[in-house]
Amino acid sequence: MSEISILRRDERAGYQLRELYRRHGYTLYRMSKFEEYDLYVRNKSFLVSEHILTFTDTDGRLMALKPDVTLSIVKNSPDAPGATQKVCYNETVYRTSPAAAGYREIMQAGLECIGDLDAYTAGEVLALADESLALISGDHLLDISHMGVAAGLLEGIPEEIAHTLLEELGRKNAAAIRDICARRGLPRETADRLETLALLYGPPEEVLPRLAGLVQGQTAEAAVRELEDLCGLMAAMGRASHLRLDFSIVNDMRYYSGLIFRGYLPGLASGVLSGGRYDNLLHRMGRRGGAMGFAVYLDQLERLETEEPSYDVDTLLLYGPEDSPSTVAERAAAILAQGRSVRAERHIPQGVRFRTTERVSEGGEL
């Protein structure tokens, strides 16, 4: 039995993901378990959960146990115009989780790419998101969207109304979108376009042609061209078979500026991976350039159905008073050298499941 096979599912996934990112040139990033509370309170709507654990430091500052990794990386990494920083992490965050009530220590793995980003870099991040899901399950989906498509359709609409429409778009609530547009006196064409966008879903080759007659304005048209290029790059990388376009994936426009995506596994209603391009967050924090990344929520893996192993140990090694301790040790070492796990006992223990039984004195399988 290999060392990695005895780890919990979330621990095993965290180890494998870190190795995946390292092989693609991402440097492991280590950070403190806490930050000043002000960092998070100023960016609460960027967080997965608005609940934050706080404490007062010895110098009187209000501190927070880290509920998010991205904000810490952006705050603490150097601003290097013209360069690209590629970092990955396997960290514990502290927040509420849909998997259980109350605050939890949650293992989270992911990567961030900050600085001078180009089309290939964006494609690499998206491809690594797909490969991350594939490491956990071959039966996965990576749903992608682009904030520019919805932003283009919402141009000229008052911010409060646009925010409400964006929320209903995220719920795929076409009826609510129609009602809001009617009550606010928006053109019927706007309502029709938003309703259609809310319900669009499918593989890129099916959905992208339907966007041609739907989008309007330079912002939306540029977003569609970027999606076409990214989907083409993913196909060239051999990672397009699990892609789906879903424009109900929306995030706060104050932080996200382009591609956004979520990853799903069978048996989990909520996404296990979330990411996107967050240039606007970078600029809000006084940084230049662009930023894109994603996180895998390893705590969600606890909710996946797991196949119970049929045995606890490969070989039960039985010995008697006639067998010297050195002989037992030698025989156990020989079994381990064959790649099998072994448990040495004088008698067959109750409640222990094993594949085979051997006796030291006979040196053979029963």
Image (tube, rainbow, N blue to C red):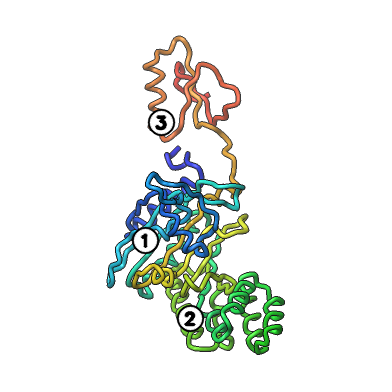
Q: Secondary structure at mark 2?
A: helix
| Marks 1, 2: nearer the viewer | 1
Q: Tell me residue 270's x, y (percent).
A: 60, 59
Q: Secondary structure at mark 1?
A: helix
Q: Tell me residue 365's x, y (percent).
A: 50, 25
Dot 1, crowdedness within 10 Å: few (<14), some or many (≥20)? some
Q: Which residue is mark 1?
A: 75
Residue situated furthest top in the rendering = 322
Q: Secondary structure at mark 3?
A: helix
At x 60% / y 22%, what residue is drawn?
A: 350
Task: Compare marks 3 and 1 and give the one earlier in the sequence.
Answer: 1
Label 3 is placed on what type of residue? Leu
Which label belongs to residue 223? 2
Q: Distance of mark 1 from mark 2, alpha carbons?
A: 28 Å
Dot 3, crowdedness within 10 Å: few (<14), some or many (≥20)? some
Q: Which residue is mark 3?
A: 336
Give the answer, above or below, for where 363 lies relative to 303: above
Q: Tell me residue 275's x, y (percent).
A: 48, 64
At x 30% / y 63%, what residue is drawn?
A: 78
